[in-house]
Image (cartoon, rainbow, N blue to C red):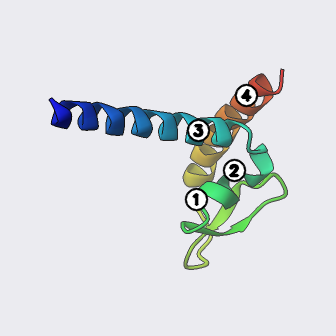
Amino acid sequence: MRVKEEREAKAKAEKERKKQAEEEMKNTPPEEYFKKYESKEYSQFDERGIPTHNFEGKELSDTQINGLKKKWEAHKKKYEKSKK
């Protein structure tokens, strides 16, 4: 019985931790999103905070940048929605 209660308490704590992390992410300005959450993957960013170079300093391809722009736009929408 006690094992079940401990397992449920751990699951509840993990769920709460994930919820807080999501909330923090939603409240991160779009310009800071990649710098805060994916800074280990990229070394340079444009004026909007979108990565332009990988961690080795190599310029990203147009395809990679376009994918990151879409991700940035999606985050921007979440951020703006959270501020309403």
Q: How many marks?
A: 4
The residue that label 4 is drawn on is: 77
Checking the image for residue 33, the label placed there is 2
Of label 1 and label 4, which has the lower sequence position? 1
Would you say 13 lies left or right of 42 here?
left
Element type at mark 4 = helix
Residue hosting label 1: 38
Q: Give SS at disc 2.
A: helix
Label 1 crowd bin: few (<14), some (14–19), many (20+), radius 10 Å: few
Q: Position of residue 6 (x, y in %)?
A: 26, 38
Measure the C-alpha gap from mark 1 to mark 3. 18 Å
Disc 1, disc 2: CB below 8 Å? yes
Residue type at mark 1: give it. Glu
Q: Locate residue 13, reporting x and y percent.
A: 43, 38
Q: Viewed as shown, does residue 82 lie left or right of 54? A: right
Q: Quadrant of residue 10?
A: top left
